[in-house]
Structures are given as C-alpha cells and as structure tokens.
Image: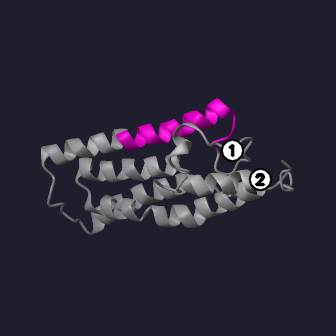
Amino acid sequence: MTLPTVTDDDRPNRVPWPPIIDVGVLLAAWLLEQAVPLSMMMTSAPVRLAGWFGVAAGLAIAAAGLGYFQVIGTTSNPTGRAARLARGGIYAWTRNPMYLGTVIAFVGLAFALGSAWLVILAILMPLPLRKLAIEREEAYLGRRFGVEYADYCKKVRRWL
C-alpha cells in the first residue's frame, strides 16, 4: 500500500486545542459559578457519588486511549505527527477515546461537585473539540494513512 504524500511539517494541528479547551471549560465554569450561581436540583450524596464514578470511568477511557498510543509507539501530542494508526484496543470501539473520556469525566465532575455550569459546558465540549481538534486530526490521518484510515472510519464511530 502506498501512503499519500505527507510533508515533514504536516501535522494535525499547530495549537494543542484539547488541553486548552479542557482548561477553558473548567475556568469558565468556575467563573460563571462565581458570577451567576446556578443551583443543581439533584445534589444528594448518591448523585455526587455517581458523579465520582463518572469521573473514574471517563479517566479510565482516556487512559486506555493514551496507553494504547504508547503500546503502538505513536504520539499523544495533539500537534504531533502520527507514527502509526491506532485501530486496536479501545480504538476498536471509538476513534476518540481520550476526548470521549474527558467529556465523561467532566460531566461526572459536574455532578460530583454540584456545578450546573460545568454540566452545561461539559455537554457542549464536543462542539469545540470537533471543530478545533477532531476534524483537523481526521483530515491529517486521512492524508497520512489514506485508504487504511478511510476503512477504519467506516468500521468505528467517532464517539461511540
């Protein structure tokens, strides 16, 4: 199989958007909570405990994605060049386990802390992630791995 031509400076992104979005969501939720507090209707101990389980589940999903990158010897840097296409492990179920895990962890954290603003912003997180990171990464992976990546995309959904 012949790979498409990829230049040495071809990268999925020049800016590491995912951690910027993560920090931005947490900071925005905290600032909004200070300026316009919203009370959550369900802040009982069981709901908070379920939130912590959500945090743990989300972190486990993200860690599985990160760990698989290490196993196959490719970068997890959102601005780095991929050495290999991740298709096994958790990548057999979702193309974006690190982003999916982060969103789940943030929703869980919102319930654990009783932050309505964080619930709202965590639910909206996939929008900037898709536009600023995922679409660019997918275009890059298409250039880098060609038909192999296109076939993978036909078999595995972006989120779940």
| Residue in front for this viewpoint, 90 or 126 | 90
The reply to whether the magenta stretch includes residue 103 is no
Q: Mark 2 points at which residue?
A: 144
Please indicate, yes or no, whether residue 47 appears anywhere in the rendered image. yes
Distance CA(mark 1)–CA(mark 2) = 9 Å
Choose the circle earlier in sequence order: 1 or 2: 1
34 or 64: nearer the viewer:
64
Look at the image and name its color scheme: one colour
Q: Is the magenta stretch mostly helix, strand or loop?
A: helix
The residue carrying pointer 2 sits among few (fewer than 14), some (14 to 19) or many (20 or more) residues within 10 Å by Cα, namely many
Name the residue type under label 2. Arg
Q: Name the residue under label 1.
A: 85
In the rendered image, the vertical position of residue 131 relative to residue 22, given as above or below: below
Q: Residue at (44%, 47%) from the top-left corner?
A: 101
Region in magenta:
57-76
Q: What element carries label 2?
A: helix
- With 105 as the anchor, is 140 left or right in this view? right
Q: Is residue 47 left or right of residue 106?
A: left
Residue 13 marker: none
Mark 1 crowd level (few <14, some 14–19, many ≥20, 10 Å Cα): some
Q: What element carries label 1?
A: loop
Are the residues flagged by discs 1 and 2 in contact, CB closer than 8 Å? Answer: yes
User: Quarter of the image holding residue 25?
Assistant: bottom left
Nearest the eye: 147 or 67:
147
Q: Is residue 16 visible?
A: no
Q: In this view, does 84 lie to the left or right of 157?
A: right
Residue 139 drawn at (x, y percent): 70, 62
Residue 31, how many percent across, how many down?
35, 62
In screen coordinates, is 120 left or right of 67?
left
Q: Which residue is drawn at 21% across and 41% down?
A: 49
Residue 80 rendering spot, x and y as whole percentages: 71, 47
x%, y% of residue 24? 47, 59
